[in-house]
């Protein structure tokens, strides 16, 4: 048992030594790796610093690139500016052409207007001359008229002024107008009296005719009414008209059904809007009777 433990301890010690050697190797390897990395980083930093200084320094690569870029931008700007200037020049030339065409059209229009105005001016001058001659003629006619009118209004044409003659004529005209108005009123009054006289004459004639009809026991020829009720037993008829339609007591009326006369009636009683009648049997058509709604008209054979 002790022998086995000895070997186990020896093996463990050997393992520890091996592990220790491995750790030393690993430590040494990482140390050189770190040193190499730091060296490479410092070298790269140095190279980057040198390159950056060379690039950003005056006359360096970046400055050259910026210079080339600026030249390219300026060149493009100049090209665009040249195109813009050329387009503007073409556009301006086109505008100038259009403006010149408009000016020429306006000039032609103005010249046409001038000619038209000249013609109107010449026409106006001729018309003015005509009006002037007419005015002179009217003045002469006015003076002649005043000379002719002055004696009519009891004024001396040689001494009276035009205003005095005009005032006298106006006064005379007002008097004539007043007389005309009075004559018109009298004519209207006479016409009204004539119309009233005619109306009274017509009324008198109608009254005379009515009196004659009443004396002759005749109802108006234009009478037209309806049967309101009919008593078949007594042949007694009531009409829907009376004094308002001019029905006369004792007058004869005819009962009509279409174009056929059924019979005649004898008026026995008249009220304001009703009339009572008896059927005249001798005039009744055989087999017929007076019906409600039959038309009744006057009989003027007397």
Image (spheres, rainbow, N blue to C red):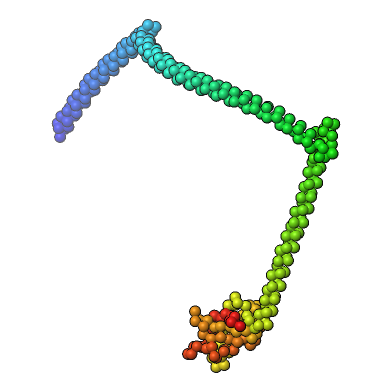
In this rendered view, identify the residue nearer to me: 271 or 28.
Answer: 271
In terms of image quadrants, where is residue 229?
A: bottom right
Quadrant of the snapshot with the N terminus: top left
In this picture, residue 186 sits left or right of residue 20: right
State the residue at coordinates (60%, 84%).
252
In terms of image quadrants, where is residue 170?
A: top right
In this picture, residue 95 sits left or right of residue 214: left
Quadrant of the snapshot with the C terminus: bottom right
In terms of image quadrants, where is residue 20?
A: top left
Instruction: Inspect this view and state whether residue 6 appears.
Output: no
In this rendered view, identify the residue nearer to me: 232 or 57.
Answer: 232
Instruction: Inspect this view and state whether residue 198 appears.
Output: yes
In this picture, residue 270 sits left or right of residue 81: right
Is 255 placed above or below 51 here? below
Count the numbered circles shown: 0
Residue 113 x %, y % = 54, 23
State the residue at coordinates (21%, 25%).
19
In this rendered view, identify the residue nearer to me: 62 or 42.
Answer: 62
Is 73 placed above or below 7 here? above
Residue 228 x %, y % = 57, 83
Residue 284 x %, y % = 52, 88
Residue 115 x %, y % = 54, 22
State the residue at coordinates (57%, 80%).
297
Q: As drawn, which residue projects farthest toward the top?
A: 59
In this rendered view, identify the residue nearer to me: 227 or 67.
Answer: 227
State the residue at coordinates (82%, 37%).
151
In this picture, residue 51 sits left or right of residue 136: left
């Amino acid at each position: 048992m002790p022998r086995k433990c000895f070997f186990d301890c020896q093996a463990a010690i050997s393992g520890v030594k091996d592990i220790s050697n491995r750790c030393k190797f690993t430590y040494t390897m990482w140390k050189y790796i770190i040193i190499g990395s730091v060296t490479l980083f410092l070298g790269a930093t140095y190279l980057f610093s040198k390159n950056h200084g060379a690039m950003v320094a005056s006359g360096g690569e970046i400055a050259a690139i910026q210079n080339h870029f600026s030249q390219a931008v300026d060149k493009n700007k100049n090209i665009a500016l040249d195109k813009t200037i050329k387009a503007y020049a073409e556009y301006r030339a086109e505008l100038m052409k259009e403006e010149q065409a408009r000016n020429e059209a306006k000039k032609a229009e103005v010249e046409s207007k001038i000619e038209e105005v000249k013609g109107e001016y010449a026409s106006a001058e001729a018309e003015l001359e005509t009006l002037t001659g007419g005015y002179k003629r009217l003045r002469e006619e006015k003076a002649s008229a005043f000379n002719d009118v002055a004696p009519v209004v009891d004024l001396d044409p040689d001494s009276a002024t035009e205003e005095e003659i005009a005032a006298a004529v106006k006064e005379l005209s007002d008097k004539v107008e007043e007389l005309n108005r009075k004559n018109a009123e009298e004519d209207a009054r006479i016409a009204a009296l004539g119309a009233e006289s005619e109306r009274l004459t017509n009324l008198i004639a109608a009254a005379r005719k009515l009196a004659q009809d009443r004396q002759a026991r005749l109802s108006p020829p234009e009478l037209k009414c309806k049967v309101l009720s009919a008593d078949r037993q007594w042949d007694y008829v009531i009409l829907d008209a009376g004094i308002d339609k001019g029905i006369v007591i004792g007058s004869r009326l005819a009962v009509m059904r279409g174009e056929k006369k059924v019979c005649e009636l004898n008026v026995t009683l008249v009220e304001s809007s009703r009339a009572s009648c008896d059927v005249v049997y001798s005039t009744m058509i055989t087999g017929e009777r007076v019906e409600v709604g039959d038309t009744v008209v006057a009989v003027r054979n007397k």
